[in-house]
Amino acid sequence: MPQPDLTSLLIQKAEQDCYVLKQMAGDAESPVEIFGFHAQQATEKLIKATLSFKGVVYRRTHQLTELADLAIDNGIQFPPIVESLVDLTPYAVEFRYDVFPNEGYEELDKPAILEQVNAFYEWTCTFVSYVKDKN
């Protein structure tokens, strides 16, 4: 059974992460780990909002691929941008608490990621018929 209250809460929390992303996207000095963390968090919350809306039970995890696969297994077809957003998983914990590696990871294209997260946000809101409270 869908959980509209949890769905709305997750979307509202994702909006907060999107706000931080917007503030950091144009700032070359903003730490890549922090930007990546909020991009991962917004994506995670949006996937979980979709799962919650469909009544799909998910475990507590930051693994975006696992969550996306669970959605697909339950008949939810995400837009193609989610495929690239799942690559943000290491920013949830690994890069949040460990030293960011200087090699093996490209600098994030902050404006492009912001655009992708915003597009996924819009898709999610449409999917769950969420209307932001304008009050």
Image (cartoon, rainbow, N blue to C red):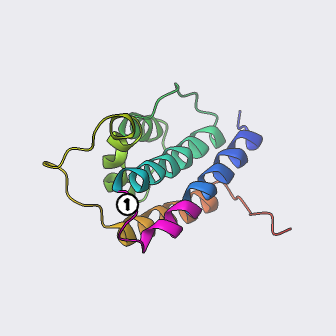
Q: Which of 100/74 is in front?
A: 100
The stretch in magenta equals: 19-31
Is residue 25 within the magenta segment? yes
Q: Position of residue 12 (x, y in %)?
A: 68, 53
Q: Position of residue 91 (x, y in %)?
A: 37, 44
- Furthest toward the top, the residue is 59
Q: From the image, tell me which residue sits under label 1.
A: 81
Residue occupying the point 45% across, 54% down:
39
Quadrant of the image containing the N terminus: top right
Q: Position of residue 103 (x, y in %)?
A: 13, 49
Q: Is residue 53 above or below residue 82?
A: above
Residue occupying the point 56% across, 45% down:
45
What amino acid type is highlighted by mark number 1?
Ile
Q: Which of 51/24 is in front?
A: 24
Quadrant of the image containing the C terminus: bottom right
- Furthest toward the right, the residue is 135
